[in-house]
Image: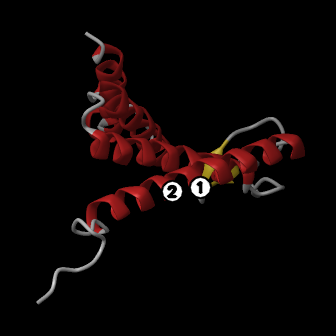
Amino acid sequence: MRAVPGLLALLVGAGLIGGPWWSSTLAKSDYPLVIVLGIVFAAIGIFAALPDSWTRLRTLSFALFMGTFGFVCAALALTPLHPAADGTWAIAGIPGFVSGAPIPWWARLIAGFFAIVCLGTAVLGVWGLVRDLFGRMPEGGADPPA
């Protein structure tokens, strides 16, 4: 029963990831945004749904969530200062976003801070997972004699 909220988030994420293939009204320019949001929801849903005893898979899913959310924050922090000639904005290289004004400097600072924290957390999570999987040494801490 504890996994139900996580499964709900996972289903929402899977629906968003599959959105470009099943939606006939979704514009092609929105595909990357919908897929990235789907990855965010699916990754945190997997993390919440897994039992505590599955530490490696929980670590991987949490690192995926933090990395994806960090990239979203970095894309917002690094948006252009001025709109394109047609009046739209390109966020993370995806043109066509409509906004009334550019992102304020204080919002860029906050998004940049969260990008650094989230991407750093993702890197540290993956590093710990790799170290746990491949860095184990036999009892005693040394390689066995040949």
Residue 127, compared with residue 105, is above or below; it is below
Q: Mark 1, residues whose alpha carbon is within 10 Å: few (<14), some, or many (≥20)?
A: some
The image quadrant of residue 24 is top left
Residue under pointer 1: 120
- In this view, which residue lies farthest toward the right? 105
Q: Nearer the viewer, residue 119 or 87?
A: 119
Quadrant assignment for the C terminus: bottom left
Residue under pointer 2: 124
Q: Report x, y in % for residue 50.
A: 27, 29
The three-letter amino acid code for the residue at tag 2 is: Leu
Q: Report x, y in % for residue 2.
A: 30, 13
The three-letter amino acid code for the residue at tag 1 is: Gly
Q: Nearer the viewer, residue 105 or 117?
A: 117
Residue 4, compared with residue 43, is above or below; it is above
Q: Are marks 1 and 2 in contact (CB under 8 Å)?
A: yes
Q: Nearer the viewer, residue 72 or 46?
A: 46
**Is 20 left, or right, of 110 in this rendering?**
left
Residue lying at 59% horizontally and 47% vertically, measured from the top left: 118
Q: CA distance from mark 1 to mark 2?
A: 6 Å
> Could you tell me if residue 103 is visible in this image?
yes
